[in-house]
Amino acid sequence: METAELKQQLKKQIVQFLNLTSVNPDDIKDDEPLFGEGLGLDSIDSIELIVLLSREYGIEIKDPKEGRKILVDINTIAAYIEQHRTK
Amino acid sequence: MLYIHRTYCISPQQTFGQVDLETIQEPANKRLLAMEPNYEGIPPGVLRRMGRAVRMGVGASLPLIKEGLPIDGIIIGTGKGGMEDCIKFLNQIVQYEEGLLAPGNFVQSTSNAVAAQVGMMTKNKSYNSTHVHRGHAFENALIDAVMQLNQFPGKNFLLGGLDEISDFDYNIEELDGAYKKDPVSNKVLFDVDSAGSIAGEGAAVFLVNDQPADALASIRALHILHSEDEKLVADTFRQFVEKNRNAADTIDFFLSGESGDNRTRKFYTACESALPASTPVARFKHLSGEYCTASAFGLWLACRLVQGMALPAHLLKSPASVSTPQTILLYNNYKGVQHSFMLLRK
């Protein structure tokens, strides 16, 4: 899967998984912060995203410090998926 | 004595904001679903996680809290809580073989999620309690509020009753015969002689305290009873009426929780016949539908009636001899087992 295609799929999955009903996946910028400013996600969402990565890509994030570096924006998550996905 | 000072209601009818009970909203797919408002007081990031029960409960509670009186306790009654999210979470456990589970559905599904969310969103760390006694959930919450006021005079409590229709619960209840087999308009709910009612949902919340000044209404007496024995229910009802007649409250209106289910009609008929024939009788479940805490909708309606709301003709089972009732006796039963008598006075 091409990186651009993966990012687009990831945006759709995030919107669906986190029930972001007012957000259009196409409106999420690749470098837009997911937490705090930007998309405005919170700590419960971070757990939901970890579950998403596990279910959809077979990625297990066990170290919270590692998670903070991965779940920054679409670019960082997509890069991690490309390197570590098992499915 | 418990006094009701404010109330908000989200229901299948136009009861939130501009109230309109003249126009009857009809069921969709055999369900009377609540007309949910825009929930302007709930941040979008919080709203997106909420299930229907939590949305309705919090949505009805926030305007009441924002009116400014300090809230010294939050007491909610819900028969089933956030069942839709509960089932989503349980399905996750099966689907992902007890693996990594998303926590959102679980957080929203617990029965105490509503009282907890209201407490957290308003930074209210006072008494926070949820009662889950199926058809007596709201009544037990009300008893809790009365006990709290006896112990802590002068305090204000937020009291609420709410339930949602979930697909899972609807299917189970339908298989159990709780709802009519064929689609029925709620406009003729009481004319169809068959088993079952129409599924309903909603949230009614009340600001209550022990201060009579400027109150909408007061709860003079409450009695709850578990029984399938028609005679015992009727005898208990007569005793309740007699006991409260001694308190000089003349019951001038009977608000019946009749649900259109011909299996439970006998209880309502027995209680109606225990009152003078001239007592007007009104029914409300063609508006709310049947659910565990429908009595909270009944209480909301009773508050409106003693405040002088014009009586829509479709409410009346027998002609009304009074335009604004002063003392209303609300009788409700859930599945012909859980009965409650509530005496309300302006």
Image (cartoon, coloured by chain):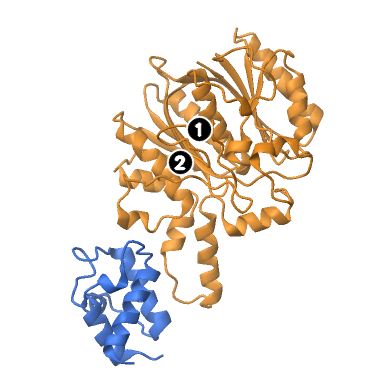
Chain colours: A blue, B orange
Q: Is any part of residue B77 visible from this angle?
A: no
Residue B163 or A16: which is nearer the viewer?
A16
Would residue B96 appear left or right of A44 to someone viewing this image? right
Binning the other alpha carbons within 10 Å of mark 2 as few (below 14), some (14 to 19) or many (20 upward) gives some
Q: Amino acid at mark 2?
A: Ser
Q: Quadrant of residue B284?
A: top right
Q: Residue at x 59, y 19 (%)?
A: B328
Q: Residue at x 68, y 15 (%)?
A: B279
Q: Amino acid at mark 1?
A: Asp
Which residue is painted at 57% across and 40% down in the image? Answer: B137
Q: Report the residue marked by disc 2.
A: B129
Q: Alpha-carbon neighbours of circle 1 within 10 Å: few (<14), some, or many (≥20)?
A: some
Residue A52 in percent (x, y) is at 38, 76
Task: Please state the chain letter of the residue tagged with numbered disc 2 in the rendered image.
Answer: B
Q: Quadrant of residue B140?
A: top right
Viewer-proximal residue, B152 or B273? B273
Q: Which residue is mark 1?
A: B144
Res. B21 mark: none
Mark before the other along the chain sequence, 2 or 1 = 2
